[in-house]
Each structure stands twice: as structure tokens, then as C-alpha cells.
Image (cartoon, rainbow, N blue to C red):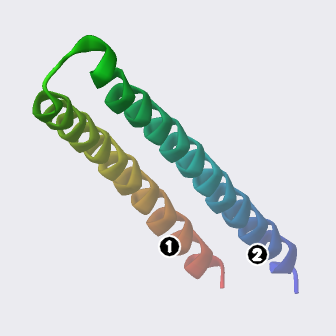
Amino acid sequence: MGGWPTRVSSAISISQTAHAVRIAASARSAAAMATEVRQVLGVRDTGEAPCQVVTELIDWRHSEVRVRVAELKVLERQLDELRTRAARRS
């Protein structure tokens, strides 16, 4: 029973971290969509060819995905480490 509070606090910490990650991802996604909509709507004002705008959006989104994948890999390593520590305490 001595280890029980540690396990509970670790579970709460992991839950809070996961919740924070979901909130950040949602906010990032909403901001990205707003930016993309503004860019596409701006095509009519600038006279740019839509294909160029779409290509730029794809490139931008691709770089965002690469960044997100890198962030997720870091998170995965952190979760693996937490899981390993939790298993040692059990």
C-alpha cells in the first residue's frame, strides 16, 4: 500500500499530460485551418493561380506534419520512460 499514492499521482500526471497534448493539438489544428482558409480566400484578391496556392498549402501542411511527428516521437519516448518507471515500482 506504500506505493499506491505514487501510482495514483503518476496516473493523474499522465492523464493531465495527455489532456494538455490533446488541447494543444486541437488549438494548433484550428489555427492551421483558419490560416489555410484565409490563404485560399486571399487568392481572389491577389490574382494568384489557385494551383500555386494549393501547392504552397500542401508544402506548408507537409512541414507541419513533420513537426507533429517529431513531437509525437518525443512524447512516445516520454511515455515509454514513464511506463518503464511505473513497471519497476509495481
The residue at which mark 1 appears reads as 84
Q: Are marks 2 and 1 in contact (CB under 8 Å)?
A: no
Taking the image as shown, residue 43 lies to the left or right of residue 80, namely left
Q: Quadrant of residue 57?
A: top left
Q: Quadrant location of the N terminus?
A: bottom right
Residue 78 position, x and y percent, is: 48, 57
Taking the image as shown, residue 24 lies to the left or right of residue 9, namely left
The disc placed on residue 7 is 2
User: Foreground residue, 66 or 76?
Assistant: 66
Q: Is residue 84 above or below residue 39?
A: below
Q: Quadrant location of the C terminus?
A: bottom right
Residue 9 position, x and y percent, is: 81, 66
**Label 2 SS:** helix
User: Foreground residue, 1 or 58?
Assistant: 58
Q: How many marks?
A: 2
Amino acid carrying mark 1 in the image? Thr
